[in-house]
Amino acid sequence: MDSDASDEAIELRRAIGFLELPEGRLVEARRMLEPLHDDMYVVYSPDDEDTVEIAEALARIRLTLDGTHREAPEA
């Protein structure tokens, strides 16, 4: 696995991922936040406040994206 789990890198990756959300770039946010969550899970623990926050954001992203895909007309 390729990652950068230094405190500065984690904060930067988190900021970038969360900046994508208000812009509606959910796929991009998910691409940034999923590997970050994996790193946070290992480095800080699944119970860490930031790890939980990222997991919750990912859950909301998945629900939104899944809802979007279900509502799309089938070809």
Image (cartoon, helix red, strand yellow):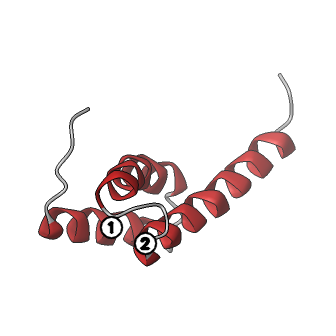
Q: Position of residue 15 (x, y in %)?
A: 31, 72
Mark sitting earlier along the chain (1/2): 1
Q: Position of residue 74 (x, y in %)?
A: 86, 27
Q: Position of residue 13 (x, y in %)?
A: 27, 62
What residue do we see at 44% from left, 49% from top?
34
Marks 1/2: CA distance? Answer: 14 Å
Decide which of 64, 8 is in the foreground and name it: 8
Occupied quadrant, residue 45? bottom left
Occupied quadrant, residue 29? bottom left
**Residue named by callout 1:** 14
Q: Are marks 1 and 2 in contact (CB under 8 Å)?
A: no
In the image, 51: left or right of 2?
A: right
Decide which of 75, 52 is in the foreground and name it: 52
Indicate the amino acid at tag 2.
Answer: Asp
- Residue 27 seen in render: yes
Which image quadrant: the C terminus? top right
- Mark 1 lies on a secondary structure that is helix
**Residue named by callout 2:** 48
Which image quadrant: the N terminus? top left
Indicate the amino acid at tag 1.
Answer: Arg
What residue do we see at 56% from left, 58% from top?
58
